[in-house]
Amino acid sequence: MADLRIGGASLPAAIGLPEVHAPGQAGEAGPASNFMGSLKEAISHINDAQSGASQAVDALVTGQTTNIHQTMVALQQADVSFQLMMQVRNKLVSAYEEIQRMQI
């Protein structure tokens, strides 16, 4: 029973705030490109989590590993990441629709 240790949980990487450039600086990227870069990076992290969970399930099914706990943690991390992405998408669509309803 002395072998029951709990390993540290790794937190998903936080999405950093885009750097703000003064107008007229060389190499200036617009706010849209910073936002798109952040979104692409976040989606890439979520895709990596989904791939890792899939590989963990495959390894468990083929008998390469017997650590069901690590597999379940990977599945839950991928699920929570995906749910977060869907909620962010829903908020973005809602904001877009609200902007479309604005009268000029």
Image (spheres, rainbow, N blue to C red):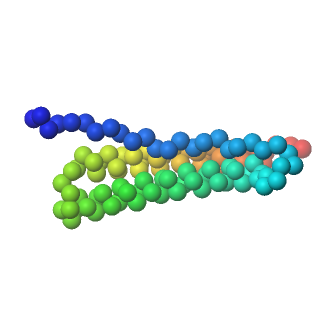
> Residue 99 or 53: which is nearer the viewer?
53
Residue furthest right in the image: 104
> Residue 50 or 41: which is nearer the viewer?
41
Q: In screen coordinates, is 100 left or right of 11?
A: right
Q: Where is 1 relative to 56, above or below?
A: above
> What's the residue at 74%, 52% (across, down)?
32
Please state the horizontal and vertical placement of residue 13, each as a whole percent of the image: 50, 44
> Residue 66 or 91: which is nearer the viewer?
66
Q: How many labels does the image show?
A: 0
Corner quadrant of residue 55: bottom left
Viewport quadrant of the N terminus: top left
Residue 94 in view, yes or no: no
Residue furthest front in the image: 26
Q: In screen coordinates, is 42 left or right of 30?
A: left
Corner quadrant of residue 43: bottom right
Residue furthest bottom in the image: 62
Please state the horizontal and vertical placement of residue 36, each as a whole percent of the image: 67, 54
Residue furthest left in the image: 1
> What's the residue at 43%, 40% (across, down)?
11
Q: In screen coordinates, is 84 left or right of 4?
A: right
Please state the horizontal and vertical placement of residue 26, each as a whole percent of the image: 82, 53
Q: In screen coordinates, is 19 left or right of 56?
A: right
Corner quadrant of residue 18: top right
Q: Where is 29 relative to 88, above or below?
A: below
> What's the residue at 60%, 42% (across, down)?
16
Viewport quadrant of the C terminus: top right
> What's the residue at 72%, 54% (across, down)?
33
Residue 45 in view, yes or no: yes
Please state the horizontal and vertical placement of residue 87, each as a whole percent of the image: 55, 44
